[in-house]
Amino acid sequence: MDIDRTNVIMSPLERRLNTISRHLIQGCFSDSTSIVASPAFYGASVFQNVAQAPEDPILGVTVAFNKDPSPLKLNLGVGAYRTEEGKPLVLNVVRRAEQLLVNDLYRKKEYLPITGLSDFNKLSAKLILGSESPAILENRLATAQCLSGTGSLRVGAEFLTKHYHQRTIYIPVPTWGNHPKIFMMAGLSVKTYRYYDPTTHGLNFKGLLEDLSAAPNGAIVLLHACAHNPTGVDPTQDQWEHIRQLIRSKNLLPFFDSAYQGFASGSLDTDAQSVRMFVADGGDCLVAQSYAKNMGLYGERVGALTIVCKTTDVARKVESQMKLVIRPMYSNPPIHGASIVTTILKDRNMFYEWKLELKAMADRIISMRRQLYDAVSARGTPGTWNHIIKQIGMFTFTGLNSKQVSFMTSEYHIYLTSDGRISMAGLSSDKVPHLADAIHAAVTSIA
Ligand code: PLA
């Protein structure tokens, strides 16, 4: 065993480290094996200059939460549904589907096709576009099973970078923090359009129309299909119709992110209206779907990208190119999550059972809004708080600033993203008073 650096002058600390590593190595090779450390062993790592990256602004909240030993702690950061007992929920219908899959001894674990399970793709397109959708009836769409919403957005973005003449995508301000990164990494150039008005806690409709009117012809526009994240503010039906007309008149390309179908209103059809309105006019559009929230399949990573085209012929070519995007990325998608979804969507009873469970989740979130609003009002917290009830979907965009958020975390062990977004789905009745106390204290003690 020879790991001494005989010709090198070592500092006391280096000498000590050297002795420790010698003991460690000797411990590992306590037989008569003798190793000679190569010169590379002592040199600097080739990754020496890699900078420490900050935690993700959303998922990093959970990292901090997990480190907090306080029994009072409450994670309202990531949008993950919790029961009234504060526990993660696996839907009964999902458990049933999994049981069926496990008991089916004919099931295999072969590779899926590059675009995934074909039944899953058909059923997913039907779920978001509606069974009577002209795009489905005329067979002018291409769907690929992808890795949840994020993967669907990324595959769509990569496809656009390769095959679409305009490389600029407009995203709302604010938007889900991962959007700009997904699109930039895929090679698109990201610009923004006004969306939220902090003074009204509602939609800045005028700003939105102005910014999209000024966008160059053909630009891509990212739209949240429903339950806008982080604001919980969606356009009304009339406003959607205005947006549609503007987008079509300028030949902008709509790219829908549908991560919360069923979570906004409790109805799968109501929450798909914006997408269906655009598809009904016969124009092109992209839709990224996620089953993370509405089926509670977060970690299964199951979603779909659908590209609606104007003709069948174009759709088939688009599909062929989608495969070329996917194959070098991850070859083909995983089988389990998509099989669960397919089992549920194709069985009338299971589909019905899913809708009931989904509605129950949406209703619980709505009741949390009411309870939090009542609790904040009862404390006479300065400011207006009716946006807690008016906003929809998983999140409330409270208007709390980053200092107030830090205060709530350090003093009350309540974890939320620094932009003041609260995941209502993570709240339960027994925690409402604690949260309302924290909001009251933050607002009254920090400007
Ligand atoms: N699109 C939007 C608008 C989202 O809010 C999320 C998830 C996704 C896509 C992607 O979800 P998926 O890949 O898991 O299907 N947003 C969460 C989680 C719920 C996250 O940040 O990853 C959030 O807390 O904002």
Image: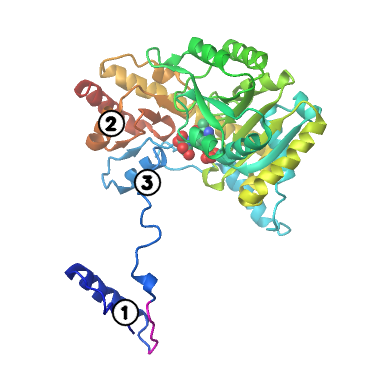
Whether residue 80 appears in this view of the structure is no
Q: CA distance from mark 3 to mark 1?
A: 33 Å
**Which one is closest to the eye, mark 1 or mark 2?**
1
Identify the residue shown where x is 61% and y is 32%: 355
Q: Where is residue 76 shown, x and y percent of the image?
A: 38, 35
Q: Which residue is mark 3?
A: 53
Q: Quadrant of the C terminus?
A: top left
Disc 2 residue type (three-letter): His
Disc 1 residue type (three-letter): Ile
Specify few, some or many for label 1: CA neighbours under 10 Å numbering under 14, 14-19, or 20 or more.
Answer: some
| Nearer-the-camera pick, 151 or 314 | 314
**Which one is closest to the eye, mark 3 or mark 1?**
1
Q: CA distance from mark 1 to mark 2?
A: 58 Å
Sequence-first tag of 3 and 1: 1
**Which one is closest to the eye, mark 2 or mark 3?**
3
Relative horizontal placement of residue 150, taking residue 423 as reference (left or right)? right
Whether residue 322 appears in this view of the structure is yes
| Nearer-the-camera pick, 198 or 413 | 198
Q: Which residue is mark 1?
A: 3
Q: Where is residue 368 shown, x and y percent of the image?
A: 41, 27
423 is higher (above) or lower (below) than 68: above
Disc 3 residue type (three-letter): Ala
Specify few, some or many for label 2: CA neighbours under 10 Å numbering under 14, 14-19, or 20 or more.
Answer: some
Q: Which secondary structure type mostly characterizes the magenta part of the structure? A: loop
- Mark 2: which secondary structure? helix
Identify the residue shown where x is 65% and y is 15%: 250
Q: Quadrant of the N terminus?
A: bottom left
Sequence-first tag of 2 and 3: 3
Sequence-first tag of 1 and 2: 1
Q: Which residue is mark 2?
A: 434
The range drawn in magenta is 32-37
